[in-house]
Image (cartoon, rainbow, N blue to C red):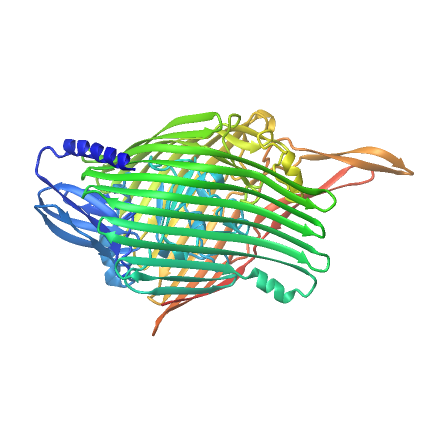
């Protein structure tokens, strides 16, 4: 570590010498924090109107800008917070911390916020979304469960897989191609209840960022998107809490100081009670149920103004169980995630900020069955130990440089089987292997020629599996050219590689989906994405953007026809199946056009998103080698979101979504062969189905209206909120999947019907929360 620090300082000193020549310059640096709680705020824009430029706070609220001597006006803005202005006379280096107050819904505050809103046309980054916690709270949710991933599904270019599913399909990619990061730890399975809810408890989150393209070089390892989530740090000044009671779950969040002004904590927990409800109404000896729970915890300590330590963790489980004591039968099915991160922030100087992270992450799937003298246990898992070292260097107002290294040891256990039977004896088999994934990157967010913003970066990734090594460069570039009247033209290119793969034949994020490694036989997936668009800031906090993209992916994996790795009903059979023999690789082509119109301030806020897209796949061993549409190819996708703050006590909101139906493979004809003659009847035993084209049937269009009303009242010792919501308000029978019923008469003539299965009619729900 000492050598790494010395090399870092030597490199920065050398670069600083280049940028320090010329006019006398001074540096303004500091942290931006939330007023009252003292939490650090990432992604805050600090803009200098006289120079028409600015900077953005990093992931830990730190900023630095070096300017010529003079007098400047600084404007601080962030989504969900009131902007502020300050004047400064710069004749020496200045440390300036700022405190932003969450937006208050009064007319005067709204007017001030509107004047200070950050502008989409001034940001060099394209294809990105930042969500505030308020936007998540105000949007109607399935069964009242607030879910950040479902809010992201309302953005253009992002689609859900199916009814109620929290999986994300971003610009033609699958759910395994999304890099989900929680406090620097990778999350491998983000689903509760087979994908109907995500594991991310909104009460514990501080910020959420989505990148759909133009990926900064500091991110890698997936093809389609990066979703970066940071947990709250905890209030350093006073104790606060939040209790929530809903239709299917209850939650508790508590935060406060351990050492006031220096050390704080936050703990958030959530649990469902499906199992308790089922137990009340079930009096038979057959018992069964399901529940899930989450636990988020974080402690942070500020040693001094230049050194901060964060320790955070997540633990969550889903559990199905079935038992009969009379027959001695007990079966359990479970899956869950665990992660932990230790991070040390160190500020070397007013221009240099570093972060060192030690990371642990694990996903485990487990089946257990006990019956008399027989016991079976099957599990699969992926476990990571990782290290990251990141440096932020701010040489001048026109340059913000980031570079760093990372390395992760993956341990895969695709199959571990233990069988104990009294008459046979124990059987214990396990498949285990380790890999090493590393990367080094550098990126420079710069302003050129006064009107051109650019983020240029290079990432070099390296992967080792046994005796096989892969090394690949990943160039990245994002450009934004600012035109008069708050217009901007943007373009980006990004190359990505993915070294771990998800084996799935369901497409809906079942826990039986397995993570596996690239090997000497299975190459890493790779993609190249280019995007072009424009952005415009309109008055009253309204902005509009239009983007088009093309993405080509190679070495995408899929199961061969009829192949499967894990059969849930018979896990013993999986031990003899080689997953490498059962998959095939191919290519994917995706293209699309995205329109996003957003209103950020005022009593009425919301957005309109529209996506026109197409995704095709090609595998030599599937569909006779011909291209075919992806299952979740969706030609048209529309989302309309409206939030109306009637008063400080009353908010109503609604969302309407529309999407072209998903694709399914359905047989065009069914054959039977006669095998015997009984009297006057022919007995047909064999049945064959012809499918002329993979995904040859497009389902009916999907559309749905959700509504909610939030009623808030300030009480003597806190704030009470009632939320009533309607999911699928006009009870649209949206298709979840289709099945065919085929019959034959005595002559063998085929008669068939296509049947639609739906999940959710109109669903009312409630949630009560009390904040103190």
Where is residue 361? Give x, y as percent: 45, 44
Residue under the point 35% across and 42% down: 128
**Identity of the residue furthest to the bottom in this view:** 716
Q: Nearer the viewer, residue 80 or 228?
A: 228
Residue under the point 72% across and 52% down: 372
Residue under the point 28% across and 46% down: 345
For residue 760, above or below residue 92: below
- Classify residue 454 as left or right of residue 663: left
Where is residue 511? Give x, y as percent: 55, 45
Where is residue 312? Give x, y as percent: 38, 51
Where is residue 46? Give x, y as percent: 21, 47
Q: Quadrant of residue 651?
A: bottom left
- Classify residue 12 as left or right of residue 461: left
- Classify residue 573 as left or right of residue 435: right
Quadrant showing the N terminus: top left
For residue 325, above or below residue 678: below
Q: Quadrant of residue 299?
A: bottom left
Quadrant showing the C terminus: bottom left
- Is residue 571 among the parts visible in the rendering? yes
């Amino acid at each position: 570590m000492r050598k790494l620090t010395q090399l870092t300082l030597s490199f920065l000193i050398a670069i600083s010498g280049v940028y320090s020549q010329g006019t006398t310059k001074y540096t303004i640096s500091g942290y931006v924090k939330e007023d009252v709680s003292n939490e650090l705020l990432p992604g805050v824009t600090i803009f200098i109107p006289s120079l028409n430029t600015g900077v953005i706070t990093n992931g830990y609220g730190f900023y630095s800008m070096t300017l010529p001597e003079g007098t400047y006006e600084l404007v601080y803005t962030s989504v969900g917070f009131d902007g502020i202005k300050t004047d400064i006379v710069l004749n020496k280096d200045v440390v300036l911390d700022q405190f932003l107050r969450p937006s208050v819904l009064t007319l005067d505050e709204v007017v001030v916020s509107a004047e200070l809103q950050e502008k989409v046309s001034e940001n060099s980054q394209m294809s990105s979304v930042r969500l505030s916690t308020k936007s998540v709270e105000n949007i109607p949710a399935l069964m009242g469960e607030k879910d950040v991933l479902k809010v992201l599904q309302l953005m253009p270019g992002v689609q859900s897989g199916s009814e109620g599913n929290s999986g994300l399909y971003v610009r033609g990619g699958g759910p395994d191609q999304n890099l989900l990061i929680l406090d620097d730890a990778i999350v491998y399975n983000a689903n509760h209840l087979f994908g109907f809810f995500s594991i991310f408890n909104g009460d514990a989150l501080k910020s959420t960022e989505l990148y759909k393209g133009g990926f900064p070089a500091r991110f890698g390892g997936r093809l389609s998107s990066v979703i970066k989530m940071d947990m709250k740090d905890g209030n350093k000044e006073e104790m606060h809490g939040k209790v929530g009671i809903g239709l299917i779950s209850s939650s508790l969040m508590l935060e406060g100081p351990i050492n006031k002004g220096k050390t704080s904590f936050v703990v958030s927990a959530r649990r469902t009670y499906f199992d308790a409800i089922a137990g009340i109404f079930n009096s038979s000896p057959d018992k069964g149920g399901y529940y899930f729970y989450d636990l988020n915890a974080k402690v942070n300590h500020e040693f001094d103004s230049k050194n901060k330590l964060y320790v955070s963790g997540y633990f969550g489980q889903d559990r199905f169980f079935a038992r009969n004591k009379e027959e001695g039968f007990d079966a359990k099915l479970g899956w869950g995630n665990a992660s932990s991160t230790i991070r040390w922030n160190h500020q070397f100087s007013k221009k240099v900020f570093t972060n060192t992270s030690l990371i642990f992450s694990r996903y485990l799937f487990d089946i257990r069955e006990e019956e008399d003298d027989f016991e079976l246990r099957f599990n699969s898992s992926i476990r990571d130990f990782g290290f990251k070292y990141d440096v932020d260097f701010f040489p001048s107002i026109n340059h913000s440089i980031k570079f760093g290294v990372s390395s992760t040891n993956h341990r895969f256990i695709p199959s571990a089987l233990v069988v104990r039977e009294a008459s046979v004896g124990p059987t214990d088999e396990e498949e285990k292997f380790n890999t090493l994934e590393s990367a080094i990157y550098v990126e420079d967010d710069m302003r050129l020629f006064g009107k051109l913003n650019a983020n240029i970066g290079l990432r070099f990734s390296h992967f080792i599996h046994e005796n096989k090594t892969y090394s690949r460069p990943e160039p990245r570039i994002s450009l934004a050219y600012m035109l008069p009247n708050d217009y901007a033209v943007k373009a980006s290119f990004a190359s990505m590689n993915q070294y771990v793969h998800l084996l799935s034949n369901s497409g809906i994020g079942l826990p039986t989906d397995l993570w596996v490694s690239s090997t000497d036989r299975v190459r890493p997936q790779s993609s190249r994405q280019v995007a072009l668009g424009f952005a415009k800031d309109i008055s009253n906090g309204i902005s509009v953007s239009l983007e088009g993209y093309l993405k080509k992916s190679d070495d995408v994996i899929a199961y061969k026809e009829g192949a499967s790795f894990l059969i849930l009903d018979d896990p013993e059979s999986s031990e003899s199946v080689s997953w490498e023999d059962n998959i095939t690789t191919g290519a994917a082509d995706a293209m699309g056009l995205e329109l996003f119109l957003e209103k950020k301030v005022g009593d009425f806020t919301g957005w309109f998103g529209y996506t026109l897209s197409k995704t095709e796949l090609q595998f030599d061993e599937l569909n006779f080698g011909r291209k075919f549409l992806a299952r979740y190819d969706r030609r048209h996708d529309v989302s309309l979101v409206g939030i109306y703050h009637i008063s400080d006590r009353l908010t109503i909101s609604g969302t309407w979504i529309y999407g072209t139906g998903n694709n399914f493979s359905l047989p065009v004809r069914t054959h039977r062969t006669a095998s015997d003659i009984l009297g006057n009847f022919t007995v047909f035993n064999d049945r064959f189905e012809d499918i002329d084209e993979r995904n040859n049937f497009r389902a009916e269009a999907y559309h749905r209206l959700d509504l909610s009303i939030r009623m808030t009242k300030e009480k003597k010792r806190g704030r009470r909120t009632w939320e009533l919501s309607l999911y699928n308000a006009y009870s649209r029978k949206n298709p979840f999947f289709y099945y065919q019923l085929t019959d034959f008469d005595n002559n063998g003539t085929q008669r068939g019907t296509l049947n639609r299965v739906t999940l959710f009619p109109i669903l009312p729900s409630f949630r009560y929360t009390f904040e103190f």
